[in-house]
Amino acid sequence: MSQITEFHNEIREILKSIAQDAENFEFYKKSTIKTILLPPSSSEHTWVNLAASFPPYMTEAKAFTNTKATNKVIFRMFHSPTCGHFAVFACTDSLDRTGLQFGVWKQNQTECLFADPNRCKAHTLIVAGMPLRMCAYCSAVLVKSSYKCSRCKEKAGVHVRYCGIECQHAHWERHKSFCNKTK
């Protein structure tokens, strides 16, 4: 479990470096990081379907940054047209990112995390995701309190955020397909 703690600390350091001010980082410090562990695989190919692992944030999501990495962790930021922005972080249980890469699975055009079986075969894969404090409509970084879809938060625990009521109204046509399912 100390690897998980160190992994979460590494994620918080990454978020600290990309947060635009102290208030924004305070939000990330308190945010829940959803972590999944995948045992070593004996198969020739190891991959993680991010939409299945982090619904609804990764449903229909597309990367909006290139893959980035520290010495220990690989990460990428995504935007879902219905639920906003989300970041995915990954490493192995030895706190190593070698052999990991993000990509699109060609069969169904789903965003995935791929692990090179030659480098990662004996290791548990640690993957984490968390919502980003960005407007789901205009992508502005939110440094102050933001508007949230109260139905999603109450029914599904999703934090779809907006910089103002105008963006929330403008995004409704896209968001309602997800939001209406949370009844």
Image (cartoon, helix red, strand yellow):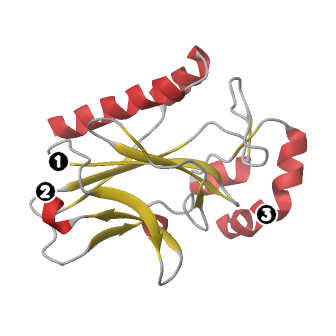
Q: Position of residue 135 (x, y in %)?
A: 72, 41
In-image side of 169 versus 100 (left or right): right
Give the labeled residue for mark 3.
174
In the rendering, at what x and y percent does residue 128 appear? 37, 48
For the residue pair 88 and 109, the one nearer the viewer reads as 109
Looking at the picture, does residue 105 appear above or below residue 96?
below
- Disc 3 on helix, strand or loop? helix
Q: Quadrant of the N terminus?
A: top left
The CA distance from mark 1 to mark 3 is: 38 Å
Q: Please indicate whether residue 136 sits to the left or right of residue 126 in the image.
A: right
| SS type, badge 2 | loop
Residue nearest the viewer, comparing 172 with 15:
15
* Between discs 1 and 3, the one toward the N terminus: 1
- Give the number of the mark in front: 3 or 2: 2
As drawn, 170 above or below 110: above
First-in-chain label (1 vs 2): 1
The residue where tag 1 is placed is 93
Does label 3 or label 2 sit earlier along the sequence? 2
Mark 3–mark 2 distance (CA, rounded to whole Å): 39 Å
Amino acid residing under circle 2: His
Q: Is residue 144 above or below residue 119?
A: above
Name the residue tied to disc 2: 123
Seen at 59% across and 61% down, the residue is 62
Is label 3 in contact with label 2 (beta carbons under 8 Å)?
no
Q: Are marks 1 and 3 in contact (CB under 8 Å)?
A: no
Q: Are marks 1 and 2 in contact (CB under 8 Å)?
A: yes
Query: Which amino acid, by three-letter code, is at mark 1?
Result: Asp
In the rendering, at what x and y percent does residue 50 appear? 44, 64
Q: Image quadrant of residue 182?
A: bottom right
Q: Secondary structure at mark 1?
A: loop
